[in-house]
Image: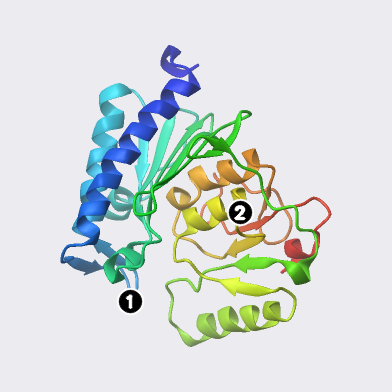
Amino acid sequence: MADNVSVEEFLATAVDAAKKAGEIIRKGFYQTKHVEHKGQVDLVTETDKACEDLVFNHLKLHYPSHKFIGEETTAAYGTSELTDEPTWIVDPLDGTTNFVHGFPFVCVSIGLTLGKVPTVGVVYNPLMDELFTGILGKGAFLNGSPIRVSSQTELVKSLLATEPGTKRDTPTVDATTNRINNLLFKVRSVRMSGSCALNLCGIACGRLDLFYELGYGGPWDVAAGVLMVKEAGGLVYEPFGKDFDITVPQPRIQVSIADDMDAPKRC
């Protein structure tokens, strides 16, 4: 085990960091936000940066030899390559647009990879006080209680989550909306929460039956959530059916929840 530390200790440290960052989010949620644009609709606030600093400082204090990849640091200093070294992958505030608008689907996402394999995951929504945790091979939990994916196997009875993305050029918007239009004839309904990590956790705890997102931001969006889905008995694919690989640059993600539900693999 890296640094002779157990995965349970890694998890406990990550939970502490997530809860400390969650307190910053909770306080900032009800205050005036200072917003910057990373793109046409992609936002960042001082809370994103404060949370990432807090989480990284907390983790570095405990594990100074580990590697770190974060959304805001990576955006500022270039892409960090994932290696076999123990690596913490952090989205300090997933759902920044929700945060800016006072929509309470926001979270801290912290994942740890060992040998490039997601091994520990924490996703914390401080506004709903929901803490999702997972350890490779040891299950996934919501506020300490075990969670499982939905048992729904009929597409027509399924609740599907997706996201529109941040690009607003006409071809991308047309492709995105056409895809949703087609899917609406095949599922019960569609939801867009504005948080990739919370969508994945929604799959893990059975609130959602299916989730896909194309061209998401980076590994910080999925490092913890993908682990949660798998540990809760779910399946994670790339769009054309290959097993999801967090090391693939600019990956695209698709999630389904049952071995015999083959339709989602081809959406």
Give whichever of discs 2 and 1 has the lower sequence position: 1
Is the residue marked by circle 1 packed among few (<14), some (14-19), or many (20+) residues within 10 Å?
Answer: few
Location of residue 150 in the rendering, given as x and y in whole percent from the top left corner: 69, 53
Where is 176 relative to 90, above or below?
below
Q: Gap between marks 2 and 1, in whole Å?
A: 29 Å
Q: Which mark is residue 203?
A: 2
Q: Quadrant of the C terminus?
A: bottom right
Q: Please tell me which residue is depicted at 36% across the width and 62% down the height of the picture.
A: 104
From the viewer's perspective, tell me whether residue 147 is left or right of residue 150: left
Amino acid under label 1?
Gln
Which residue is situated farthest in the right direction here?
260
From the viewer's perspective, tell me whether residue 87 is left or right of residue 37: right
Label 1 sits on residue: 40
Where is 16 relative to 178, above or below?
above
Q: Please tell me which residue is depicted at 52% across the width and 64% down the height of the picture.
A: 215
**Disc 2 + disc 1, Cβ < 8 Å:** no
Q: Nearer the viewer, residue 127 or 61?
A: 127
